[in-house]
Image: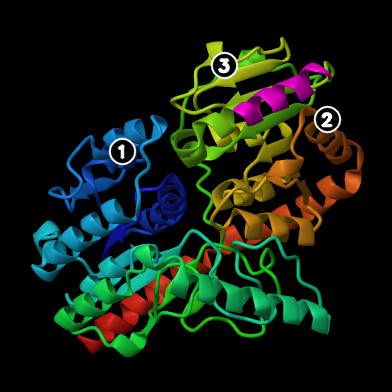
Amino acid sequence: MATIVFMPFHWAADMNASFALARKLQNRGHRIFYLTIPDTEDRIRAQGFDWLPVFTQVFPKGELEKQSASEIQGKAYGAAEFKARLRAMCELLRNDEISRATSGTNPDLFLVSSGMPWVGIAACKTRIPVIQFSSTVISVEDRSVPPFRTNLVPDDSLLSSMRIMLEWKKLFLRRRFRNRAWDISSELKALARDCGFPLGKIDFSVETWPRLMLPELVFCPKELDFPRRKIPEGAFFVEASIDLQRKDDSFPWSRLEERRPVVFCALGSLVTTKAAPQASRFFHMFLDAIRERPALQAVVAIGSYLKPEEFDCPANALLMSHVPQIELLKRCAVMVGHGGFSSVKECIFMGVPMLLVPLHYDEPGNAARVVYHKIGLRLQLEEVSAGTLGSCIDTLLEDVAYRDNARRMSQKFVEIEELSPACQIIEKTLAESSARS
């Protein structure tokens, strides 16, 4: 069997999506290592995987906590700070950081997050096969699929295609004239030249970071995506990669009553850190809506920095810093959230309708897909109040079509998860590499 090294980004969405695939591969006899920054070690070892450190000079242990503490005080982590870290990582990669970090493990394959194209470029320098994975939907120019930062829900009309193409043009114009501070094209081109990676295999015309034209596992069944005119080169839409064995936080299950529907509310770790005041206002409105509905019970995950004593919590609500989300969704009738892709997929997997209030990055596009497939509702942030939240929750509970649609999509997700197409692609790549050597 093979030795496979995972290199996810340190965000929870990337980490969690990788765990299910890593566990499947481990169960098939492969040896799994995680190569990540020190602050992720405990999380990875808790899942039962071997861990190796990388980029320790750039991300010494405690660095992420230090960054979060600054952001909670309103000191934003901006482009300058990111660029400094990126350049430091690129310098380490030029000096064979990956080979050094994996010395003695003899990897047969690297699985690298597409959110770190600089790592993918350097991994190819080792001459070991590299497969990317994505914990978001791929967002490349397509007249049928809008950028995922927009709220557009496409249809088959000419007007829809025109609106979508206009959004793509606006995106590239903004990048050219307004968002240049975050442009990493020059850093990637320089690293690619130094590592012998062909510049022609980097696509710079995408919504997020430049995309490497390497095999890429997209942890999103095509059934959830919008219909595309063309599948992006190298992309394989595989299982959602939901890890039902994930080790998560404890929970006071005795506090939940069987007879009352559970509404779960969460905004993810990034929102409750980077936008804590806005998250606090949102939770206050949600709790007001739940107070007016004593027939329901609610669980609210408020994150590490907001405190329960800051809220006037009604008797039918439970405030927690963190929850075992997958296990809790098994008990839920509705989830209220911001549209993070991991949460959307986990809700679908458990057949739970959603009320989404997208805030940034890919969340508008995720919410648009939920609306397109009629498995939930969405509100824009400026529309949110205790009244609108409560009204939408009532609709999701009373209109059985949302739950029926969610359950049908759940069946498809479960079937694809059991087929494990990602494992088949990986093992085919390993077999082809072995045959060449």
Vertically, is 165 above or below 322? below
Residue carrying label 1:
67
Q: In this view, does 170 lie to the left or right of 382?
A: left
The residue that appears at 82% across and 45% down in the rendered structure is 403
Answer with the quarter of the image where residue 286 lies: top right
| x then y, percent, for residue 383 | 76, 41
Residue 103 on the magenta span: no
| x then y, percent, for residue 108 | 23, 70
For label 2, the SS is helix
Does residue 414 appear anywhere in the picture?
Answer: no
The residue that appears at 81% across and 84% down in the rendered structure is 158
Q: What stretch is highlighted in magenta?
A: 281-292
Mark pair 3, 1: CA separation: 31 Å
Mark pair 1, 2: CA separation: 36 Å
Q: Say which amino acid is labelled 2.
A: Gly
Vertically, is 432 above or below 61? below
| x then y, percent, for residue 370 | 73, 56
Vertically, is 3 above or below 172? above
Front position in the image: 224 or 118:
118
Quadrant in which the N terminus appears: bottom left
The colour scheme is rainbow
Answer with the quarter of the image where residue 247 lies: top left
Among all residues in the image, which is located at the extreme right?
Answer: 399
Q: Which label is found at residue 252?
A: 3
The residue that appears at 10% across and 67% down in the rendered structure is 96
